Image (cartoon, coloured by chain):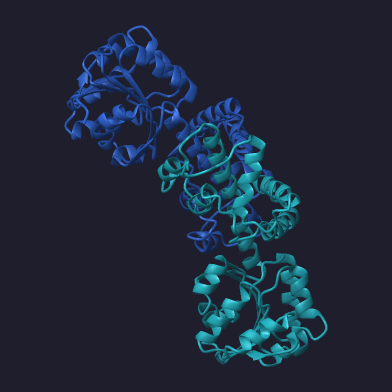
Chain colours: A blue, B cyan
Amino acid sequence: MSSAPAITHVGFIGLGIMGRPMTRNLLKAGFDVTVHSRTRSKVDELAGEGAHAADSPAAVAERSDLVITMVPDSSDVELVARGPKGVFEGLRTGAIVADMSTISPSVTRALADDAASRGASWLDAPVSGGDSGAIAGTLTIMVGGDAAAFERARPVFQAMGKRITHIGPSGHGQTAKLCNQILVAVNLLATSESLVLAAKAGLDLERLHQALSGGAGNSWSFENLGRKMLARDFAPAFMVRLQQKDLRLVGEAARELGAPVVGTSVVEQFLRALEASGRGDDGTQALVTVLESLAQTTVQGARA
Amino acid sequence: MSSAPAITHVGFIGLGIMGRPMTRNLLKAGFDVTVHSRTRSKVDELAGEGAHAADSPAAVAERSDLVITMVPDSSDVELVARGPKGVFEGLRTGAIVADMSTISPSVTRALADDAASRGASWLDAPVSGGDSGAIAGTLTIMVGGDAAAFERARPVFQAMGKRITHIGPSGHGQTAKLCNQILVAVNLLATSESLVLAAKAGLDLERLHQALSGGAGNSWSFENLGRKMLARDFAPAFMVRLQQKDLRLVGEAARELGAPVVGTSVVEQFLRALEASGRGDDGTQALVTVLESLAQTTVQGARA
């Protein structure tokens, strides 16, 4: 229905733990990919695998029908888009920017307005699924912005993800991601409180975990992070300090909207204690250690 | 391995919304079942379906190898067991009491000691899965008490449930149930906070629900109770006032054990507000209406 040509040239800015495997999946799907990162070695790495290297976000935009940004925070996206040699300097008329970072919904709307004034479209398209989802190409992608731009971008998203939903207008993808982070955070508190009470009562935690998995108390968190807690595996799939960044965004959005986020705010404060104790690079399942230290117990699975 | 004979005669005390279908499944499995309830009409109903009627808990115990109690609270179980014409008056040597109510772990241990002093065994065997699980015979059953008694009772449990776990010694079944209720309560808060923030931001809640189900934020609560919230379906599968009873038990156990239950206590207080407003007989998913009234919004799914 659309007269806009299919997207063939994709730009990718931000080659971190998520960006690199996402870029590889775009290359695998046959897109002509141009990459940029502040770290030259990461650009070289992807260039060695078939991507074009660009020395600025503007240079990426000049070669691309669609530019993906995947950077840590709102201010990083603003700098990449509006800064010197930024995306907006090189953006073609009719092009699309798909920001797959997790950032503020209100900053997103302002950037989308900017893009529109330059004859381009801005999609917010944050993801969940972590680095394993990025590698496997099974990310969940929540998209806000113009429906026609979403349809044009869909084949690009399909190269990186599986559950791809157009949530609504600009900013709604980011808000959906924040709703996901509320669930992730508060379910993690549920898992921790439950296992710590069980440990204090001296229960066999492996049997407990087996009994409660699959029931009405079950969650992705209980199944997956609960199991890691019992195994004392605190390696990061999702780091405490990144979860904290997302919960800060939740707090800001909740304040703007007038929405109460009581449980989320409890989790944010417990994770703050964890960061203060130097464990910001642990996986979020380390939240349980805060409750453990309050209760002077350890959630330990199979006994020696 | 055990020389104790197989259980053929089962007693059932408490013929409420759970007890009646559980009794029917015992009859279906071929057990000789004797029932008692304070409400005579419920006894007559089951007698018409093949159960023997007894006019007291003691009379049930006199005819039974295993006596099941399924009543509301700790004090009800104490009365049924120790009261006049109670189970302990009629209990046979070598018999088993399986208390499938949700009650206090410490009250449970005292009752188990009493039973042992009379030459009988006490199993705590609370369930989850609600009336639909009771009807389908798919209850989750978490059992505490003597392992040999558990093995003898297993065929009886198998007539009513599916996921049957011997958690550990006396009281550990009840504690496992409380751990389940912590998960249920706090996951419900997660679901409510997330949907209320989304509603305040004007998101299409059906699309949001679809996008987040199956991801890292997912839970039984989000999938099932979230869907009911969007449909404005507050019919009870599990009533607010019963959830409150269970959270009171969580609070008591947590106090005895020295375990922090921060999230659970927030939910207890929100549900208290709901009860105070006269909605104690609603399903627990009505928790969302407390956050809705704080935020002055409504979590409504498909728009008219």
Relative to B31, B77 lies left or right: right
Residue B129: x %, y % from top left: 55, 65
Relative to A143, A54 lies left or right: left
Relative to A85, B195 lies left or right: right
Identified at 60% across, 31% down, the residue is: A272
Q: Tell me if residue B28 comes above or below residue B208 in the rendering.
A: below
Q: Is residue A284 visible?
A: yes
Q: Tell me if residue A262 comes above or below residue B232 in the rendering.
A: above
Identified at 83% across, 84% down, the residue is: B84
Identified at 43% across, 47% down, the residue is: B213
Which sits in the foreground, A74 or B88? A74
Residue B149: x %, y % from top left: 60, 81
Which sits in the foreground, A85 or A298? A85
Q: How many marks?
A: 0
Instruction: Give the residue furthest to the top.
Output: A84
Relative to B62, B130 lies left or right: left
Q: Image quadrant for the N terminus of chain A?
A: top left
Q: Is residue A104 visible?
A: no
Identified at 47% across, 44% down, the residue is: B217
Picture quarter containing residue B295?
A: top right
Instruction: Give the residue furthest to the front.
Output: B304
Residue B206: x %, y % from top left: 44, 43
Residue B87: x %, y % from top left: 74, 84
Q: Tell me if residue B171 comes above or below residue A129 in the rendering.
A: below
